[in-house]
Amino acid sequence: PSARRPGRGPRRASLQVKRVDPWSVLKLALVLGVALFFVWLVAVGVLYGVLHGMGVWDKINSTANDLLQANEPGEPLISAGRVFGVSAIIGAVNIVLFTALATVGAFVYNVSADLAGGLELTLSERE
């Protein structure tokens, strides 16, 4: 026994997104940027571990040692500390850029929505 009348479909509403709050976009972009930072570090760690297990880093380090320092063995060219240090710097720059670009995008959307009217959405209930 359904409460709906049999001849009537789902309700629909047409709406326009006139403004996006830049502060909420900034907060959401910051949270997503930090989450993607950890995903990035895990991906780099997995890739580093796989290549280390295959012996790629040892071969690169020995070749670099042969070419650059013929007599004295020195610090390896590629190490876990260097790889994760550079990856952390790239990830931090990515967080800043992602957050800044998303916030600027919200401002640009607000200006263009004032000129063009914003996005038109049609929302409906499930059948």
Image (tube, rainbow, N blue to C red):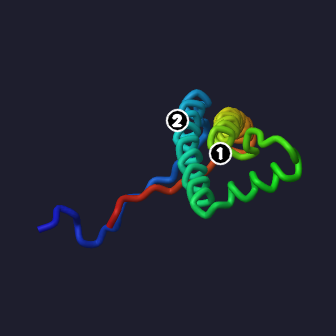
Residue that carries the numbered disc 2 in the rendered image: 31
The x, y position of residue 8, in whole percent, is 31, 68
Q: Distance between the residues labelled 2 and 1?
A: 26 Å
The x, y position of residue 7, in whole percent, is 28, 72
Residue that carries the numbered disc 1 in the rendered image: 118
The answer to whether any part of residue 102 appears in the image is: no
- Image point 69% across, 55% down: which residue? 58
**Image quadrant assignment for residue 74:** top right
Query: Which sits in the foreground, 18 or 29?
Result: 29
| Residue at the outermost bottom position | 7
The x, y position of residue 107, in whole percent, is 70, 33
| Residue at the outermost top position | 23
SS at circle 1: loop
Q: Is residue 46 left or right of residue 106?
A: left
SS at circle 2: helix
Answer with mark 2 or mark 1, whichever residue precedes in sequence.
2
Q: Which is in the foreground here, disc 2 or disc 1?
A: 2
Numbered marks: total: 2
On the rendered image, what quadrant is the C terminus found in? bottom left
The answer to whether any part of residue 101 appears in the image is: yes
Q: In the picture shown, does residue 106 fall above or below 123?
A: above
**Image quadrant assignment for residue 79:** top right
| Residue at the outermost left position | 1
Q: In this view, does 96 lie to the left or right of 30?
A: right
Query: Which sits in the foreground, 60 or 101?
Result: 60
- Image point 75% across, 56% down: which residue? 60
The x, y position of residue 76, in whole percent, is 73, 44
